[in-house]
Amino acid sequence: MTNENIEGVVNYENSGVSRRGFLRKMIGWSARTAIVATPLYGAIRVSRNITQGEKDKGIVITQQEDVPAEAIEEKTADIENLKLRLIGVRHTQDFTKKHFDALEQLVKNSSYVVAESGYPRNPVDGDVVPSPEETKNTYFKTIYELAKKYHKPIITLDSINSGLMVADMLTGLVGLSRTMKNSRILTADNTTRRELLAGSIKTMGWLGLTIGTWSPGSIFRTGIHGIVKPKSKEYDLENEVFSYNHIIDQRNVQLTKRLLQLPGLLDEDEVAKGEHVMVTFGATHTAGAHYYLTHPTALRLKDASYAWNYNLLDHEGIVQYTPEEDGEGWRVKKLA
């Protein structure tokens, strides 16, 4: 082939682009497209879930719908004299309607019901409050009504902090922007081999940070999961990634530590009234808590890594809400 352009054929020498340069640019373009397209696809899926959640008006479900139900994911753990049944759920009306019968049976057979509480109401010991938390979520409202029906105490032991949630989001945004910047450097024509190696390490590090954080990170993971794994009706708890963040992992560590305190805090006579202690969290918290309950070394390591900012959290401690005999309200008892 000559150095002159032949119609329909790209001549790299005359065009000023080498074959290696052209290949590098194509790889760079593909990589950047994937980096942008994956979280965008994940964002669409996440926004769809958020929209569905906003439609939840906080009604109380009273019977199961005559529709096929997804299997409830369940894990068990024994802590001294307590048998825990960890129930992984979706906080949606549909999930509650499909599983009402099973959920009612779980509550009925329990001695205590442990629930994540979201934003705590900072209760005062001895007060009577209208509900265990200020929530409009159908799932937990239904669980509270079932607990009231069978006179089961509710235990809340969750902490969540809006500031740390924002920090998670900003970390992911920074990671995404740095990943994009380094990917452009990698595909530059004047990049040396040493710069290529160093840039590749930086890019992978920033990409790992992006995927590992909650807000944009979860969007990235959702996009990857949606593309790589076929959509299934079964809710897969094992898919949870135990990354370093506040909204999921740090809360899982704290939830687990507080679960481990329960044997010394709960009334033995009350425990004896049920077959188990029902622990009902969102599915990602159920998977995470069970992992740390069964991997004490991992729990200690993660606990140490988060210890520096524990004082930034909305510490609710461990609070028991016992339904009043007349059914009007719940009496507060701070356990820890």
Image (tube, rainbow, N blue to C red):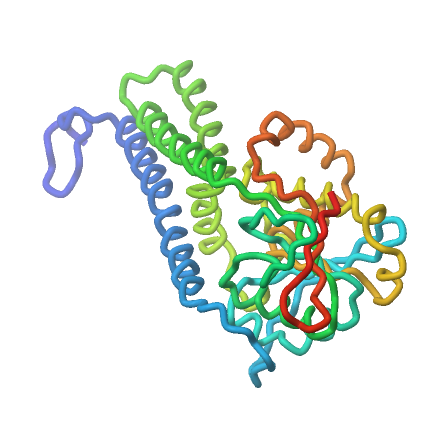
Residue at horizontal 84 percent and vertical 49 percent from the top: 263
Using residue 113 as the reference point, say whether residue 77 is left or right of it: right
Q: Quadrant of the N terminus?
A: top left
- The front one of 304 and 43 is 304
- Toward which corner of the image does residue 57 lie, by quadrant? bottom left
Q: In this view, does 44 lie above or below 29?
A: below
Q: Quadrant of the C terminus?
A: top right
Q: Position of residue 307 (x, y in %)?
A: 65, 28
Residue 103 appears in the figure: no
Q: Quick one: 174 or 271, which is closer to the camera?
A: 271
**Vertically, is 94 above or below 204?**
below
The picture places residue 290, in percent across and down from the top left corner, at: 72, 49
Specify whether residue 206 is in view. Answer: yes
Q: Which residue is drawn at 62% across and 74% down?
A: 99
Report the residue at 41% width, 57% height from top. Answer: 45
Dividing the picture into quadrants, the one containing residue 27 is: top left
- Left or right of 243? Residue 289 is right
